[in-house]
Amino acid sequence: MTPQPDRLYELLPAVYRMRDAEAGEPLRALLQVVSEQVDVVQADIERLYENWFIETCDVWVVPYIGDLVGEPPSAELGSLALAETHRRLRAASPRRQVAGAIGRRRRKGTPAVLEELTTDLAGWPARVVESFRLLVVHQAINHLHLDRGRTLDVSEMAALDRLGGPFDTVARTLDVARIGSRRTRSRWSIPAAAVFAWRLRPMSRTRAEAFCIDRTRHRYTFSVLGNDVPLIAGPLPEPDVTHIAEEPNLPAFITRRALHDRAPEFYGPGRSLQICRDGPDRSVPVHDIVAADLSEWAYRPRPHEVAVDPELGRIAFSSRDEPQEGVWVTFNEGFPDELGGGEYPRELSPPGPRYYSVGADAGAGHARVMDAVAAFEADSKAGRTPDGAVIEIVDSEVYQERIEIELAPGDRLELRAAEGVRPVIRLLDLYANRPDQMRVRGVAARRHSSGPCPPAPPRLVLDGLLITGRSVEIVGPVGEVAVRHCTLVPGWSLEHDCRPSHQSEPSIELDDTTARLRVERSIIGSILVNVSEVTVEPLEISLTDSVLDATGPEADALSAPDDRHAHAQLTAVRTTVLGRVLTHAVLLGEDTIFTGEMRVARRQLGCLRYCSVPVGSRTPRRHRCQPDLMRAAAVTLAEAQRLTEAERDALVAAETLRVEPQFDSTRYGTPAYARPALTCAPEIARGANDGGEIGVYHDLFQPQREGAVRRALDEFTPAGMAAGILFAT
């Protein structure tokens, strides 16, 4: 509704308005104030109609509508109610639970409704398998059940590939363990229904450059970093709500057998996989695609054939028909969350008056990043960038150049990726007598300031970029450097098995600078701080929803040269730090996992709360951190049971080891990178201040979502049956 400040004033007779004008319009000013409150009341009345419907109501109305239909939101999802507007959690909001209550109740007890529950409550694609149908039975000849499990046939290669997974069709013998058990779990029991859930999200890569791994130009990887990456299928929508999800409806890993048997289902424009050669628009036809095992690069494709290994993300061309102008690929790779940049939506600021586009297409303003930087510096020197500038890369190409950005006082520069692309900045070893890292350098004012106050220190924002090959160095008087949705590859680059190429090299160097470093939703390698402790105050380093990876538990994630304390004050919130931390002070550590030893010089400043910190660390005061809580509980238990000193020490050591964080993978480039394992202790999985998971994936609320699904399964599972959640990814 458009505000109308004079709506009440215009209702007055003209004679009163004339007299009010002669007196200076005091009555008009009064009625304008009254009109503001009338607009508020009218807007609230109009909103009442919207609050009648679950699709349009406010968040606070959802529990009331749930009570009306007998489906109050799950207590596990209570912490998600206010976070429902968060883009990443819309699929798991309480609104979906209430909206589908009546429809689910009508189909209560069917396998399809269990799938719907998992998707609505947790946002995980799911498939329900009635495991009792796969148990060994003696069938009557006159009444065959072809949907029952069969004995193993070694000639059925597709069935062998699916063995043990959610699409397994091989008969099994009975196991008495319950599928819903918290300890020993088995899906092969009589009243069992297994709910397979896919937690990894398919992250799309569209027309990205493939990586050539040899000089013969016929061996490539889908990953631009040269590492092996398993490909994931883009799921297709199910035809109706009663349909049981099949392999095409789920974000499952593509196997070699599946690509061989159903290549048109996966390959082609608009599908899960596409390869272009000698131009980003020259697609390889599907009849030339051959599924092959390229683990040892032993397969030799024929001319015009293209061998693809979807399990390793590798491509091989014939040595007599290799590409001459490059290879571009479109595919999906799995990752737990929208983190580190990609084609997912991001919140971008408006371009502003000074906007420089960079891209390989003719429509872009500049072909190289440094061309746009030079144009910005020229405009800054001429005084044409008072409100800052934006350099935007509009494609997913690889930019191999040496980048050096000079920022003067008053400069505001944002170097970012456009919406829906993921550009790569590859910093190569170009010079023998100088460093090749990306350098951000603060310089003196380019022009004389005419204002009464000196210009503010410069500010740089890096957003949506993948930087590999070298580090980012910040030098000189810089105010702030913000890194958002970026990946600064830990270890600079990767080997084929995702091992870092340079384990001891930092990703960010703060060298004789005053810059504040702010990292948000990014993946970075170690930070090296080399500043004077005499002339400069401790630098402020802030990490939020990020991964700080030193590539090894004994390596330094934050330090100064020569194994000294970094002259910095660290703030880490919902972050996973893989490596040691040596710093001057920690202002705040909250919901953060520190895997390496912490050595803080100034312990009187700041605190750690709801964190995981290794034993023996020197930190500021700690509040409800692990393993402190479990060690104290173990000591209390030992005293209550009157254990000997040796038995007490053994109990404390066992509890300390139990709550040590465990990860599915700690190598960047793997699908489950930095994700806590399912075997992680509950004190880690629910150790955050709101009962959530500690670490970078806190905002996924995975423990709450899993708990909500488990409680719902108990209600909607048929009597006499048991249902359990099994994670496929």
Image (tube, helix red, strand yellow):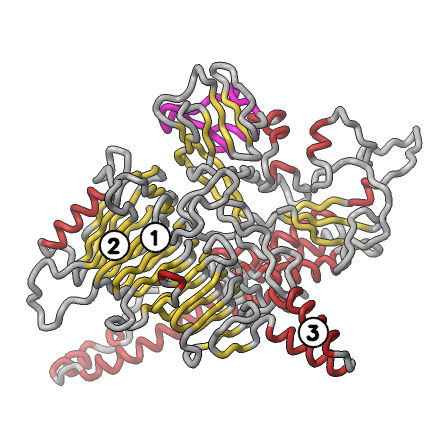
Say whether disc 1 or disc 3 marks the residue closer to the N-terminus. Answer: 1
| Segment tinted magenta in the rendering | 265-291
Quadrant of residue 520 in the image? bottom left
| Label 3 vs 2, first from the N-terminus | 2
| Disc 1 target residue | 463
- Residue type at numbered disc 2: Val
Q: Residues within 10 Å of mark 2 (few under 14, many from 20)?
A: many
What residue sits 9% from the left and 54% below the top? 382
Q: Is residue 425 magenta?
A: no
| Left or right, 322 with reference to 718 | left
Q: Are marks 1 and 2 in contact (CB under 8 Å)?
A: no
User: Compared with residue 229, is residue 651 higher up or lower down, i.e. above or below?
Assistant: below
**Magenta stretch encompasses residue 282:** yes
Disc 3 and disc 2 in contact, CB within 8 angstroms:
no
Kindly identify which numbered label has been placed on residue 649. 3
Instruction: Categorize mark 1 by other alpha carbons within 10 Å: few (<14), some (14-19), many (20+).
Output: many
Q: Which residue is mark 2?
A: 440
Front position in the image: 492 or 3: 492
- Quadrant of res 327: top left
Closer to us: 254 or 634: 634
Residue 185 screen position, x and y as percent? 77, 54
| Residue 679 higher or lower than 436, as above or below | below
Q: Residue at x 56, y 69 (%)?
A: 688
Measured as percent of width and height from the top left, residue 635 is found at: 69, 79
Q: CA distance from mark 1 to mark 2?
A: 15 Å
Query: In screen coordinates, is 416 left or right of 302?
Result: left
Residue 348 relative to residue 171: left or right: left
Q: Quadrant of residue 156?
A: top right
Q: Which residue is at the far front?
A: 562
Does residue 99 appear anywhere in the picture? no
Q: Which quarter of the rendered picture does the N terminus lie within?
A: bottom left
